[in-house]
Every structure is written in structure tokens, then in C-alpha cells.
Amino acid sequence: MRILAIDHGTKRIGLAISDELGVIALPLEFVPAEPFAGFLARLKELIQEKQVEMLLVGMPRNMDGSYGPAALKVQEFTAVLRDSVAIPIKTWDERLTSAQANRFLIQAEMRRDKRKQKVDQTAAAILLQSYLDSFAQS
């Protein structure tokens, strides 16, 4: 099953996809969050082109596990997606994925301007890999 992960942001939305076997997460791209219609059109293209069977949306949580204002925005975003696409949508805890992505890109000695472009899709890949790994361990 191919899964497309979404790291929702107010400026950019990071996307990552699983390999055909559902074992490895690969950063894909980022799409500007606005205009939303543009993002939705690109998402639908990718779903068809990559034969995606499920969307995985990162759900921001506070360190204590509670939900804050960012989680409410993601819930609204997910509700719109459910009305727009015909495949299942799940949410997954995304705590610290952006921090991990930044750390990874810094360790890879990526310049700051390039890091800004790659951090969202890298965070989506970390989110997706966490989800995939949860099945490998069970």
C-alpha cells in the first residue's frame, strides 16, 4: 500500500511517500499552502500518479500529549481533505519531526536557504517512517 504523508504548515505543506512495499519513506516535495485550491489540485495529481491508497496527516501535539491551536487547524484541514479525496486519511503524532528534520539537514551540511526548502518534506518523511516503523515492531 502506498501512503502519502502530509506535514501541514501555514506557508508550505511537506509531502513524503512510501515505497511500494510500505517499508521506506521518501521525501517528495513541498507545495505552497496558499492558494489552497492549488495544493488540492497537486495532491489529487499525486494520488492518481503515485497510486496512493492512504493519506497520513501529521497531528501536532504538545510535549505532554495534549492538543493545542495548531492541532485544531490540522483537524480542520483534515476535514476538508476528507470531503475532497476518496481514500482513507489517518492522523499521526508529529511531535518533534520538524526539529529532527532540521537537525538532519544541518548534519548533512545543507545551506540554510536550501534547508528551508527541504525541511517540510523531510519532516513528512520522518512522520511517515515513524508510522511505517510502528508496524514493523508489532
Image (cartoon, rainbow, N blue to C red):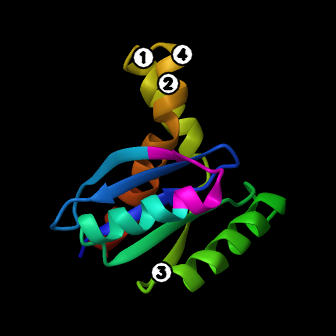
Seen as rendered, the residue at the extreme right is 69
Q: Amino acid at mark 4?
A: Arg
Marks 2 and 3 in Cβ contact (< 8 Å): no
Mark 1 and mark 4: Cα distance apart in space: 6 Å
Q: Secondary structure at mark 3?
A: loop
**Quick one: label 3, few (<14), some, or many (20+) residues within 10 Å?**
some
Residue, x 70% and y 61% (percent of image)? 61
Kindly identify which residue carries mark 2: 115
Marks 1 and 4 in Cβ contact (< 8 Å): no
Question: Is 36 a magenta residue?
Answer: yes
Q: Which mark is residue 110?
A: 1
Kindly identify which residue carries mark 4: 112
Q: Which residues are magenta?
A: 30-39
Please indicate whether residue 49 sits to the left or right of residue 10 in the image.
left
- Whether residue 66 is visible, yes or no, is no
In front: mark 1 or mark 3? 3
Q: Amino acid at mark 1?
A: Met
Decide which of tag 2 and tag 1 comes sooner along the chain. 1
Mark 2 and mark 3: Cα distance apart in space: 30 Å
Question: Is 58 a magenta residue?
Answer: no
**Quick one: label 2, few (<14), some, or many (20+) residues within 10 Å?**
some
Q: Which mark is residue 85?
A: 3
Marks 2 and 4 in Cβ contact (< 8 Å): yes
Decide which of tag 2 and tag 3 comes sooner along the chain. 3
Residue, x 51% and y 47% (percent of image)? 31
Mark 2 and mark 4: Cα distance apart in space: 5 Å
Decide which of tag 3 and tag 4 comes sooner along the chain. 3
Camera-nearest residue between 60 and 113: 113
Marks 2 and 1 in Cβ contact (< 8 Å): yes
Q: Secondary structure at mark 2?
A: helix
